[in-house]
Image (spheres, rainbow, N blue to C red):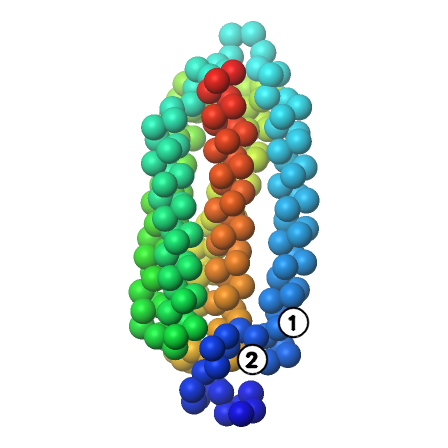
C-alpha cells in the first residue's frame, strides 16, 4: 500500500515510520535531542560549579528546598510521561479518540507541574532567593527555568497537535508529529529526574 493510500485509510502499525519523510523526521529529532542534551549538560555543569557560591546571609538550597512540593511535581511529570506512552500506543492501534484523550491528560498534568514550579519560584523569591541574589541562585533559576520553558513549549506543541489531528485526522503526515512530540516529552521528563536528583536531593543533603 502506498503512502497516499494511508492518508485516509487504514494506518500501518507504526505510521510515524510509514514514509521516508516520517522516518527522516524521527531521525532528525533524535539529532535535535542530542544537541539539547549537550545544552542541558552544560547548564548542569555550571550549576554544580556554582552551587556553593551562596554569599553571606543568603539562603542555601538546604534551607530553601521543600522536597514535598518538588516530589509532588516530580510525580505529576512522571505520570504525564506514562500518559504520553499510552497516547502513542493508542496511535499505533489507530484509536484516535483514545490517543487524543491521553494527550489531553498529558497536557493537564504538564500544566499542573508548571503551576507547582511557579508556586515554588514565588516562595523562593519571597524568602530572598532571587535570580541575582548569588551565583547559586542564578545558576539554579537558569537550569530549572530553562527546563520549565521546555515544559511550556511541549504543552503548547501537544495542544496544537491535538487540534490538528481533530481537524485533519490521524495519518502518515500527522502521526510522525505526534510521535516526535512524545519523544520530546520523554526527554524533558528524563531531564527533570536529573534535576530532582542533582539540584534538589543533593542540595537538601548538603
Q: Is mark 2 on a helix, strand or loop?
A: loop
Q: On screen, 59 above or below 29?
A: above
- Asked if residue 106 can be seen in this view, the reply is yes
Question: Percent from the top left, x then y, of residue 90?
Answer: 37, 69
Whether 104 is drawn above or below 20: the answer is above
- In the displayed structure, 38 sits above or below 87; it is above
Label 2 to label 1, Cα distance in Å?
11 Å
Please report the residue visible at 43 percent of the width from the left and 30 percent of the height from the top.
Answer: 121
Q: Mark 2 points at which residue?
A: 18
Left-right relation of 15 to 123: right
Q: Dot 1 lies on which element?
A: helix
Residue 130 visible in the current orientation:
no
Please say if the residues under marks 2 and 1 sit with CB atoms less than 8 Å apart.
no
Q: Earlier in the sequence, mark 2 or mark 1?
A: 2
Identify the residue shown where x is 60% and y is 16%.
52
Q: Is residue 64 left or right of residue 52?
A: left
Which residue in the protein does label 1 denote? 24
Amino acid at each position: 500500500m502506498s503512502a497516499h493510500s494511508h492518508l485516509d485509510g487504514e494506518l500501518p502499525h507504526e505510521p510515524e515510520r510509514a514514509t521516508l519523510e516520517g522516518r527522516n523526521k524521527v531521525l532528525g529529532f533524535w539529532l535535535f535531542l542530542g544537541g539539547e542534551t549537550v545544552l542541558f549538560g552544560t547548564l548542569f555543569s555550571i550549576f554544580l560549579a556554582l552551587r556553593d557560591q551562596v554569599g553571606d546571609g543568603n539562603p542555601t538550597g538546604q534551607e530553601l528546598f521543600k522536597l514535598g512540593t518538588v516530589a509532588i511535581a516530580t510525580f505529576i511529570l512522571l505520570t504525564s510521561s506514562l500518559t504520553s506512552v499510552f497516547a502513542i500506543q493508542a496511535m499505533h492501534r489507530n484509536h484516535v479518540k483514545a490517543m487524543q484523550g491521553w494527550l489531553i491528560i498529558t497536557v493537564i498534568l504538564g500544566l499542573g507541574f508548571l503551576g507547582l514550579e511557579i508556586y515554588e519560584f514565588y516562595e523562593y523569591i519571597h524568602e530572598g532567593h532571587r535570580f541575582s541574589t548569588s551565583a547559586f541562585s542564578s545558576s539554579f533559576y537558569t537550569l530549572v527555568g530553562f527546563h520549565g520553558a521546555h515544559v511550556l513549549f511541549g504543552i503548547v506543541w501537544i495542544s496544537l497537535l491535538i487540534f490538528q489531528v481533530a481537524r485533519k485526522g490521524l495519518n502518515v503526515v500527522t502521526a510522525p508529529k505526534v510521535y516526535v512530540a512524545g519523544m520530546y516529552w520523554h526527554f524533558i521528563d528524563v531531564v527533570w529526574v536529573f534535576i530532582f536528583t542533582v539540584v534538589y536531593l543533593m542540595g537538601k543533603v548538603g
